[in-house]
Structure formats: C-alpha cells, structure tokens
Amino acid sequence: MRTICKLLYVSSVSCLVCKALFLDFKMASKLDADIEELRSRTEEATLFRSERFVCCPWKPFQRPNLKNLAKWKFFTKNNSGIPDDQELDRVLKVHEVDTTKICNAAKDKIQVTWIGHATVLVQFDGITILSDPVFLNYCGPNALTAYRRYRKAACEIKDILVLDAVIISHNHYDHLEKDAVREIASKFPHVKWFVALKQKDWIVDQGASAENVHEFNWWEEQSIRFSKEDFTFVCTPTQHWCARLPTVDDNKVLWCSWVIKGPTKSYYFAGDTGYYDKLFQAIGNKYGPFDLAAIPIGAYEPRYITEYQHVDPEEAVKIHQDLKSKQSVGMHWGTFELTNEFFAEPPQKVEEEMKKKDLSPNKFISLCHGETWCVGDERQEPPFMTYKPKGENSKM
C-alpha cells in the first residue's frame, strides 16, 4: 500500500511538473512570437524610403503641423513658471559633482550621476557609461536660435576623470552636442561609442577613432569586453525621430534606446520616446528585469504637440512597469524650457502615478543636478518634490 501511495504521489508530481513546463513553454513561445512580430514590424523602420528612416511602423506617427505649432507658440498658455536664479538655487540646486565618489564607484553596485537633461553617468560592474552628452549652456545649431539652459550642466567634461563608453540615443541638439563629442574624443581616445544606424560617420568626423565607434540597427546586439569583463550592448527601438536641420536631414539617421547587460547588473537608457505598450513590454520581457532604467519624464505639454514623441509622467511609470525595472530615475526635465508644463511638475507627477498604482515611489525617483546616488542608499527628498506654482500652497 505504501508503495502504491508513493507511485501515485510521484505520478501526480510528475503531472504538475509537466504541466508547469508546458505552460512555461507556451508562455515562452508566445513571448518569442510577440517579439518576432514586433521585430519584423520595426525592421520596416530601418529600411530607407527616399533615403529616410520610417518614424513609427506600429501606429500612425504625426509630427506637429504648422497650424498646431502656431497654436502652441501663440495661443497656448505657458505654465512653466521658472523662477529667478536665486529661487532656482534653493529649489533646483545644481550640486558640485563628487569626483571622488565617481572615481571610487563600488563595482558590485549601480551608481548614477545626473549631469542634466539626458546626460547621465552610470557605473556598474566596473564600467562607466555616459549618455547623450550635452554640456553647453544652450542646445541648438547656434546660440541665437537655441534653447538656453535655466540650470547649468553639473560639471564640465574636464571634471569627468573616468569614462569607458558613450551611448547616443539620437541626434537632436538637446541629446547630442558637437563640442562635447569632440572634447570627449580628445580627452578619452580609448572610449567606445555606441550609436544607431548612419550616425557613425558624424561621430568619427568629430575626432573619434572609427574602430571605437559601434553602429547598430534596432534589435542588434554585440558583446564588448571592458576590463576583462564582457558587456552586451543592445540597440532597441523608440518612438521618436531625428533631425539636425529640419526638412533637410529629417530621419536620415536612426534613433534608439539602449540595453546594457554586465556580468551582474543591467541598465536601460530610454533616450527620447513616445509610448507604445507592446514595444516596452517586448524589451522588458526579452531583456528585463533591469537593475536601473533612466526614463524621460518631462517636455510633454501640450499633448497635441508632444504625445507621439515624448512620454508624460503617467506613461513614464508604464514604461517603468513594462521594463520590469527594479529602480528607475527620471531624466529629460528641469534643464531646458522645451514645453509648457510647470518646471517642477514631472517628478511630482511621477510620484503621484507610482502611488496610484500602489508602487513604492522610492522605486522611481528624480535626482538633483550633480547628485551621485548609489542605488539602494537612503537620500533626502529634494525641495523640488514639494514646490508649487505661485498662488498654490507649498510645503517647504
């Protein structure tokens, strides 16, 4: 009788194991099918049409027309409410970058420094990665027609003492600065550059060594060795576009986000993007979970101008969830007055959305300019998290 019971028990356990394996196989097959469907659709975007890349193969993509641009510039209220420098220094202070901390980053942790906008310095597994380098006090083809900073870069390139890799999401002026590329290429000739299709020549023209510039198509990945460790870089799609000279070079180069997987940690840099659920779910399912994700949270009002190319805080939180990010930091805010939302609203709205979804607000934070933070460490809440427009009650 005991033998029969044992056989029945083993049989039932075997059935459960087989069922679990079948379900895992079924889920894996569906995941692979979803990713392959998205991959095949996004491949269309990397095919030239009249020598230009396709913006958005998964849904109609509408760039703002002249009528909407005029409506925005002349008839839409600007709620940015940027105060004077004295008040900004109190609320949105630019901290001096801690070079000692950066030079002595713990190899077994992730450390992140926000230099400003989308320029982020991330360190893990012994590698130091800089994203979308912009350091001048303006972004644009020249100082006269450019967007000017209301918060300076937290450091200059001369203050960066260690650097292994630079990742570029796209060529808009607020994400890619010619002078910065030239200075980095001169100071760090060994640095490896990671760019999407058709951007390599431009980077090389600024002084980078051709063998150190790695150019990728969407979904392409490559293993690169840094300090005796292998890191996988993956170029992933975003919903955006490219141009340095509007109408002249629109979409002649590709835009992207980046997945970097090290021996023990992983990092996702979103660059600039609108929201498409299946895209970010596919990235999260294939490459997640991520130990850190840098996600844009600002430059979103009015939505009739920005919705296809910039996420708002609600969508940023959705990306955080889609990616299965363990920890996210907000970027693409608090630096240039690009759009009309109140300047301190983006991180506050992110916190609200996290709470609405019963998620810990500490898992999606925004740093101060120049702040270096080791993921998991305690930190004080910055003043901008409770700062309100004039006329509203504020808890300071």
Image (spheres, grey):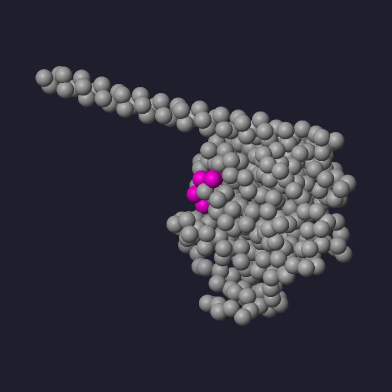
Residue 107 in view of the camera: no
Foreground residue among 135 and 187? 135
Is residue 49 visible to us here? yes
Q: Does the magenta stretch include residue 206?
A: no
Tell me: residue 144, above or below residue 273. Answer: below
Q: Residue at x 73, y 36 (%)?
A: 45
Q: Quadrant of residue 276?
A: top right
Q: Where is residue 275 in the image (x, y as percent from the top left)?
A: 63, 48
Q: Where, by quadrant of the figure, is residue 18 drawn?
A: top left
Q: Residue at x 82, y 35 (%)?
A: 49
Q: Position of residue 108 (x, y in %)?
A: 50, 47
Q: Which residue corresponds to the image point at 64% horizontal and 70% vertical from the top-left? A: 93
Front residue of this view, candidates 332 and 136: 332
Say above or below: 150 vs 100.
below
- Compared to residue 55, the image places residue 94 above or below, namely below
Residue drawn at the location 86% of the way across and 62% of the way down: 145
> Which residue is situated farthest in the left direction here?
1
In the image, taking residue 354 as reference, residue 145 lies left or right, namely right
Quadrant the N terminus occupies: top left
For the magenta stretch, what is the residue range?
322-327
Q: Nearer the viewer, residue 393 or 308?
A: 308
Asked whether residue 326 is drawn in magenta, I would say yes
Q: Residue 372 appears at what percent x and percent y?
A: 58, 60
Q: Magenta residues: mostly which secondary structure? A: loop
Image x and y of residue 247, in percent:
87, 48
